[in-house]
């Protein structure tokens, strides 16, 4: 895609154009509007971006800002209206209202805690047993805030709540399990013909495959708002593996899933390759990973590792040696230097036979190669940035001795960044 040169005459005309003074009254109106929007940002952001009801967003905002009186007033409104207790979490801290009141926002308000507990125990009420993204419960936050007695009381209530709501929770970790996972609704839409993606149509025909993901051990997939997109991406990776290395699905191989996220790709591939050992790798806590062992899947293991750490390559080398099988490395939408790491990993480790890489965004300007720094201008379209970045990675892979690289577009991947680079090493027999 060629760049269009800016019009030189337009530049000269703009340089000598007279500036027009902005009326004072208009300036005041604009400034007032900006101030109103800024003060309303917490509730507007929560209500519109995350589609949270306005009263709930207002309550979360009041708790995060430490406005005890407003929070009490809003809780009383919930009680008077007969509404169920709000189940949404704060966007910034991933905390329930009870966690925020107990100290997650920096201070503990015992009155607010007691008022929230008046709504009752259970997943649809105070949800005392819930934990935040950092793995802390309301009891933990209360103890960290110096309220030891309150923390002990909340801990006892959490134990009672876990017993009473056991059927509504994951048997492994106690996390709430939805009544109907998103994958079930997605399957219904495909059966009704509302979607026509061939890969997903075939996937939902195989009941044993997708139905297994509805088990409570896989509850981390059930609430993902982008599950449709992520599933299409994982199925495209599976199709590329079947095309490039068909023996992977039957023989003893080892797959490394770089930056696996919640490991959906690992789960999908493992369902089709019973002999394949999979190492799902990411730096996040394993709390977001399905309970594979409890689900009877012994071939998937999680490795918590920051790939940009200096010792990451050695850690992966040791894992590959430990498994002892020929290895294929997969990188789905690796951002910036993570794609470069995948290329370097494939280059340095002889035991890696195949690399399947779906690039994502460019690295930071300070880390970008000199040949690509022109892409950081605002005038360069996103499509051109992506294609030149992918071409750079393709050239890096092709420069490895005895490696052939193929480039394909995945038309059924629900993403604008759908180019797949597949590199294969040819070993002498």
Image (cartoon, rainbow, N blue to C red):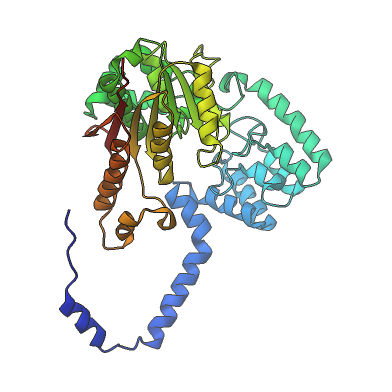
> Is residue 204 placed above or below 102 in the rendered structure?
above
Residue 356 against residue 171 in the figure, above or below: below
Lateral position of residue 210 relative to residue 10, left or right: right
From the viewer's side, name the closer residue of 280 and 252. Answer: 252
Q: Where is residue 5 in the image (x, y as percent from the top left)?
A: 18, 67
Q: Is residue 363 left or right of residue 301?
A: left
The residue nearer to you, when weighing 364 against 198, is 364
Outermost residue toward the front in this view: 428
Indicate the position of residue 320 as horizontal and vertical percent values: 49, 22
**Residue at 73% over, 52% down:** 107
Instruction: Tell me if 175 is positioned left or right of 276 in this view.
Output: right
Q: How many marks can you see?
A: 0
Q: Nearer the viewer, residue 389 or 196?
A: 389
On the rendered image, what quadrant is the C terminus found in?
top left
- Taking the spot 35% from the left edge, 29% from the top edge, the residue there is 355
State whether residue 415 is above or below residue 385.
above
Residue at 68% x, 42% y is 116
Residue in the foreground of this view, choosing between 71 and 358: 358
Q: Is residue 181 visible?
A: no
Q: Residue 35, image x and y in percent?
A: 50, 71
Residue 150's place in the image compared with 422, above or below, is below
> Could one spot residue 401 in this view of the protein?
yes
Residue 264 % position (x, y):
42, 27
């Amino acid at each position: 895609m060629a760049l269009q040169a800016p019009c030189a005459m337009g530049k000269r005309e703009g340089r000598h154009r007279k500036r027009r003074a902005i009326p004072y009254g208009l300036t005041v109106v604009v400034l007032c509007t900006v101030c109103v929007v800024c003060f309303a940002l917490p509730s507007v952001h929560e209500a519109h971006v995350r589609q949270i009801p306005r009263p709930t967003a207002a309550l979360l905002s009041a708790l995060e800002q430490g406005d005890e009186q407003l929070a009490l007033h809003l809780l009383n409104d919930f009680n008077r209206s007969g509404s169920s207790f709000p189940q949404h979490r704060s966007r910034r801290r991933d905390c329930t209202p009870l966690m925020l009141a107990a100290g997650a926002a920096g201070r503990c308000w015992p009155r607010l805690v007691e008022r929230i507990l008046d709504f009752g125990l259970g997943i649809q009420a105070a949800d005392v047993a819930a934990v935040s993204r950092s793995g802390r419960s309301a009891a933990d936050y209360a103890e960290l805030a110096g309220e030891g007695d309150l923390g002990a009381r909340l801990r006892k209530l959490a134990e009672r709540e876990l017993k009473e709501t056991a059927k509504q929770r994951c048997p492994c970790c106690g996390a709430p399990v939805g009544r109907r996972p998103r994958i079930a609704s997605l399957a219904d839409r495909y059966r009704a013909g509302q979607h026509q993606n061939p890969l997903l149509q075939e996937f939902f025909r195989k009941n044993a495959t997708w139905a297994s993901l509805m088990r409570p051990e896989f509850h981390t997939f059930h609430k993902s708002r982008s599950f449709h997109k992520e599933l299409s991406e994982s199925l495209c990776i599976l199709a590329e593996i079947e095309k490039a290395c068909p023996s992977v699905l039957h023989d003893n191989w080892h797959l490394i899933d770089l930056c696996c996220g919640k490991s959906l790709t690992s789960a999908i591939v493992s369902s089709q390759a019973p002999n394949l050992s999979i190492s799902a790798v990411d730096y996040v806590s394993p709390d977001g990973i399905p309970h594979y062992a409890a689900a009877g899947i012994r071939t998937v293991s999680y490795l918590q590792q920051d790939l940009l750490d200096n010792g990451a390559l050695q850690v992966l080398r040791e894992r590959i040696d430990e498994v002892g099988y020929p290895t294929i490395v997969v990188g789905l939408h690796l951002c910036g230097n993570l794609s470069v790491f995948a290329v370097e990993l494939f280059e340095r480790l002889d035991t890696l036979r195949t690399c399947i890489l779906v690039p994502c965004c460019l690295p930071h300007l300070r880390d970008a190669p000199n040949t690509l720094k022109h892409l950081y201008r605002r005038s360069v379209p996103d499509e051109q940035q992506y294609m030149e970045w992918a071409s750079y990675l393709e050239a890096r892979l092709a420069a490895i001795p005895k490696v052939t690289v193929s480039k394909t577009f995945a038309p059924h991947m629900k993403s604008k960044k759908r180019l797949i680079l597949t590199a294969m090493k040819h070993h002498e027999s």
